[in-house]
């Protein structure tokens, strides 16, 4: 015991420094791994919410999406589910259902918050956007950040509607998700363009969350409609 105490006294500081170094290296490794999942922080050169470089970077599509959908009728799927959980259950079973709880909800709420008239249409529920159709679309950018902050416009009063769980799903556990645009006439997605659009959300094959597709009517009827 005396020998152990003597060793601890002599090498305690070295041991502490070693543990701290291991923790620092581990934190750096995990941070580096997660960097590829995040939309990069941007320093703006003016006070506009939309920056010229965003399309090239695939950053913050939520800054321009309101200009495309505001005041327009937007048809969506009608497959959003509503869940009820026993919130007094200490095992919190709802934590394993976050992906299903959030599915479609955030897209619908954001479109509504952007002043779109959202109409749920159950005839769209079985639509699956193919890779071929995706290839004909323009990638507006990553939707992770857009969905991460959509907790502010949700209607979930329970714990699973708070920011922490949104952050976890769309940052720590979320695959890169995108907002795609499909338009036969690009002007149809401008503020003075077509009055009716389609917004189709689709689950990712791997990971959580879903991509969001915005179509004008002509593109939808030609490329997407069954």
Image (cartoon, rainbow, N blue to C red):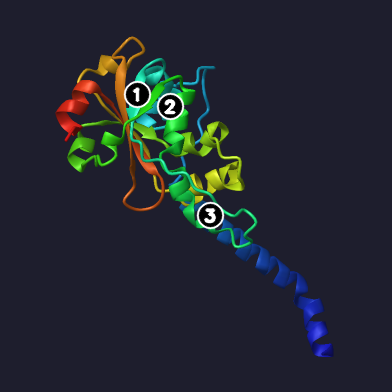
Q: Can residue 64 be seen in this view?
A: no
Q: What element carries label 3?
A: helix
Q: Residue 156 carries which label?
A: none
Q: Where is residue 18 in the image (x, y as percent from the top left)?
A: 66, 68
Residue 40, compared with residue 67, is above or below; it is below
Q: Position of residue 70 (x, y in %)?
A: 41, 17
Image-quadrant location for residue 223: top left
Quarter containing the N terminus: bottom right
Name the residue located 52 percent from the left edge and 23 percent from the top edge: 44
Image-quadrant location for residue 143: top left
User: Which residue is labeled 3 in the image?
Assistant: 94
Q: Which mark is residue 111?
A: 2
Q: Name the residue nearer the viewer: 47 or 22.
A: 47
Name the residue located 30 percent from the left edge and 12 percent from the top edge: 193
Label 2 near label 1: C-beta < 8 Å? yes
Residue 186, compared with residue 140, is above or below; it is above
Q: Which mark is residue 74?
A: 1
Name the residue located 49 percent from the left edge and 57 percent from the top edge: 96
Q: Is mark 1 on a helix, strand or loop?
A: strand
Q: How far apart are marks 3 and 1 (CA)?
A: 30 Å
């Amino acid at each position: 015991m005396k020998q152990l105490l003597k060793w601890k006294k002599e090498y305690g500081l070295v041991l502490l420094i070693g543990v701290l170094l291991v923790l620092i290296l581990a934190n750096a490794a995990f941070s580096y791994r997660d960097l590829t999942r995040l939309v990069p922080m941007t320093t703006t050169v003016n006070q506009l919410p939309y920056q010229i470089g965003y399309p090239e970077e695939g950053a913050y599509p939520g800054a321009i999406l309101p200009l495309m959908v505001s005041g327009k009728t937007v048809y969506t799927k009608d497959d959003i589910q509503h869940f009820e959980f026993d919130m007094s259950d200490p095992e919190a079973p709802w934590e394993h259902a976050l992906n299903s709880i959030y599915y479609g909800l955030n897209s619908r709420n954001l479109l509504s918050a952007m002043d779109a008239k959202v109409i749920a249409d159950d005839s769209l529920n079985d639509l699956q956007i193919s890779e071929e159709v995706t290839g004909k679309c323009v990638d507006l950018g990553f939707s992770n950040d857009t969905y991460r902050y959509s907790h502010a416009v949700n209607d979930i009063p329970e714990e699973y509607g708070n920011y922490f769980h949104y952050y976890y799903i769309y940052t720590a556990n979320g695959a890169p998700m995108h907002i795609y645009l499909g338009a036969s006439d690009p002007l149809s997605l401008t503020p003075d363009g077509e009055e009716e659009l389609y917004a189709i959300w689709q689950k990712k094959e791997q990971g959580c969350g879903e991509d969001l597709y915005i179509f004008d009517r002509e593109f939808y009827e030609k490329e997407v409609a069954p």
